[in-house]
Image (tube, rainbow, N blue to C red):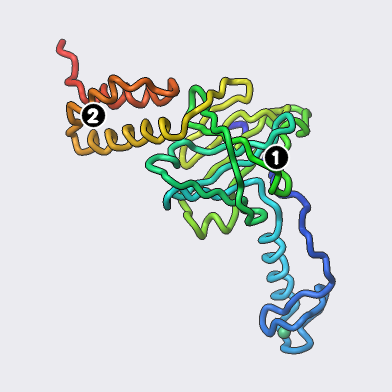
Amino acid sequence: MPLILAVLAFFIQSGVGDESPLFPCPDCTKQVSRRAVSCPACGCPGAAILEAMRADEEQKRPKHIAAIDADGRKGTAVLVRQEGITYLIMDAFVLAKTTCLAIKELGTDKNIDYSEPELMSDSPLLRFKVVGEPHASPLELSSLSDSGPPSGFLSSNDSRFAKDDPTIEMIAALGTRGELQAIHVGEAWVSTRTDKVWTAAKPADLRAQLDLLARSRESVKKDKLSDKEAADLRETRWLTPYLESQSAALLQVKQPPPQP
Ligand SMILES: [Zn+2]
């Protein structure tokens, strides 16, 4: 996994806004100097004040990651900018059974408006065009370093994620010219390339297909894929080769092992 070797956390940019010399004491909340040895009001030690200050700055630091709430299914998305257009890239499976999708940028807490969903033709990644530019500074793919491999990545290594759902993790790995090469969602690296084809996806169709796959997967787990489900899997015109391969794998399980 050479991509991890040079970890450049691009999302940690020096966007620490409030440089006021005073900071509220974590114990008594009175304003205290950032350089105070201790709080003059309550005696809280300077180290504790400094720690609280750092935690506060971390909270305010812009992140290029958005939190997704799809009818209660939590996920994450990466905000990237490519040729002047900002995109939000996320795992399509978060959308299964979704009727309402809420996306909020973690760095700013602002809601993200999106349009024109596209699906990577050979992976379960979904890309939305971001409407307007509400967010601070998405990852600029074209302006990243060109100085040799492996480049860098963007991660959801963020305490607020951990609070919401410690199991969800999403990392985007970038190539030497800033091209998006892979996204790590949950436990799997999903290979992707910006020069690969994205196809327009109708969210309703996508949801229906993801839903069928999810239902069938449950049935296979219980060892009873119904004839109806098998027929649906066989007859669906899948939106992407990836989804088709998922369907084929489920049908494979359904079939009895070949006779010698
Ligand atoms: Zn104090």
Q: Is residue 167 above or below residue 60?
A: above
Query: Which element is circle 2 on?
Result: helix
Question: Foreground: 80 or 135?
Answer: 135
| Quadrant showing the N terminus | top right
Percent position (x, y) of residue 137?
73, 45
What is the crowding at mark 2: few (fewer than 14 residues within 10 Å), some, or many (at least 20)?
some
Checking the image for residue 139, the label placed there is 1
Give the residue type at disc 2. Answer: Glu
Q: Quadrant of ligand 1?
A: bottom right
Q: Is residue 129 above or below residue 103?
A: above
Q: Which residue is mark 2?
A: 229
Give the residue type at disc 1. Answer: Leu
Question: Foreground: 229 or 179?
Answer: 229
Corner quadrant of residue 206? top left
Q: Residue at x 56, y 24 (%)?
A: 198
Q: Residue at x 44, y 40 (%)?
A: 95
Q: Tell me how far mark 1 sits from mark 2, CA to CA.
A: 41 Å
